[in-house]
Amino acid sequence: MDTMQPEPHVALIVEDDPDVRDLAAALLEETDLDVVEVESADAAVAYLQERGGEVAMMFADVRLPPGDMDGVQLAKAACTLWPTIRIVLTSGDPGAVSDGLPDGVTFMPKPWRGLDVLVEAEKAVREPQAPVT
């Protein structure tokens, strides 16, 4: 019986602005990752709870619709529960992450460059985060 976990192959985009979400999805669809789009942290957590082992990269906005958490809180939860996921947070507000980010989380200010997003996707595929030991 093969007990090996499948390699993570999903890019999870968490963005409430449909235009920005579509742009990120169009970029990430050009990578080796399958793209899943959600518009809230609550939807992201629900997806992660079901299929977190398949996620290689989470690309999330800091400011998300009202719910239980914003992008920074989502990143902190994901780092704790799914430590191998490469996390990229983005925001048009440079002060949006004033209380700091968990180790290993990348911040990308808006407007982000497509090349920078693709570099992070490549890292997610080629250099997955090491699990916490």
Image: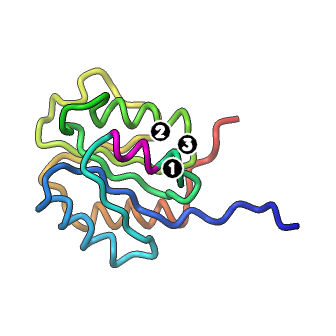
Q: Which residue is mark 1?
A: 85
Cα–Cα span, label 2 and label 1: 8 Å
Cα–Cα span, label 3 and label 2: 5 Å
Inspect the magenta stretch and tell me whether residue 80 lies in it: no
Cα–Cα span, label 3 and label 1: 6 Å
Q: Secondary structure at mark 2?
A: helix
Q: Are marks 3 and 1 in contact (CB under 8 Å)?
A: yes
Inspect the magenta stretch and tell me whether residue 46 lies in it: yes
Q: Which residue is mark 3?
A: 82
Q: Which mark is residue 67?
A: none
Q: Residue at x 30, y 47 (%)?
A: 60
Q: Residue at x 13, y 53 (%)?
A: 17
Q: Are marks 2 and 1 in contact (CB under 8 Å)?
A: yes
Q: Are marks 3 and 2 in contact (CB under 8 Å)?
A: yes
* Earlier-in-chain disc, 2 versus 1: 2
Magenta stretch, residue numbers: 42-47
